[in-house]
Image: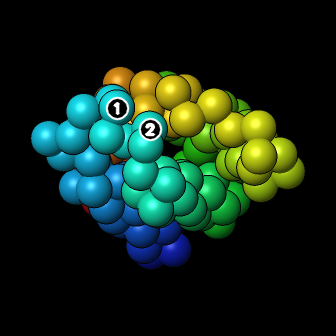
């Protein structure tokens, strides 16, 4: 695998892990009422969306199981309409999607050392 892809995948994993560490052992209510926490998590989701642009097409096609378009779409919705972000949707992504993304990205680098 191209070194640039490896570095980018590792950055994305790092951003996702930050979000998970910020939210570990928190309730939905705590998340939804903590503006700083929401902002920190949303910022890292933007960073994930920005970072996937750095992956080459060969890599993203080879790992089509990862929802690249959804990740880019979330980044675009956040950046272009921040005030309309559904914080409950962000919480859902944190709880239900980020760990799977980390696992998929880890598998992508293990499969193609």
Residue occupying the far front of the picture: 33
The quarter of the image holding the C terminus is bottom left
**Residue that carries the numbered disc 2 in the rendered image:** 32
Q: Residues within 10 Å of mark 2 (few under 14, many from 20)?
A: some
Disc 2 is placed on an element classified as helix
Q: Which residue is drawn at 66% across and 61% down?
A: 50
Question: For the residues marked 2 and 1, what is the alpha-carbon distance in whole angstroms?
Answer: 5 Å
Q: Is residue 57 above or below residue 94?
A: below
Q: Is residue 31 above or below residue 112?
A: above
The residue closer to the viewer here, 6 or 25, is 25
The disc placed on residue 29 is 1
Percent across and percent down for residue 5 are 50, 65
The quarter of the image holding the N terminus is bottom left
Residue occupying the far right of the picture: 80
Question: Can residue 73 be spotted in the picture?
Answer: yes
Horizontally, residue 73 falls left or right of residue 86, namely right
The residue closer to the viewer here, 47 or 40, is 40
């Amino acid at each position: 695998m191209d070194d640039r892809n490896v570095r980018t995948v590792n950055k994305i994993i790092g951003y996702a892990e930050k979000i998970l560490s910020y939210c570990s052992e928190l309730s939905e209510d705590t998340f939804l009422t903590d503006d700083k926490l929401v902002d920190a998590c949303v910022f890292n989701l933007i960073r994930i969306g920005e970072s996937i642009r750095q992956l080459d097409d060969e890599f993203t096609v080879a790992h089509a199981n990862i929802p690249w378009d959804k990740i880019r779409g979330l980044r675009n919705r956040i950046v272009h309409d921040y005030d309309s972000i559904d914080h409950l949707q962000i919480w859902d992504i944190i709880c239900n999607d980020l760990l799977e993304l980390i696992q998929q990205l880890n598998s992508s680098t293990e499969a193609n050392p």
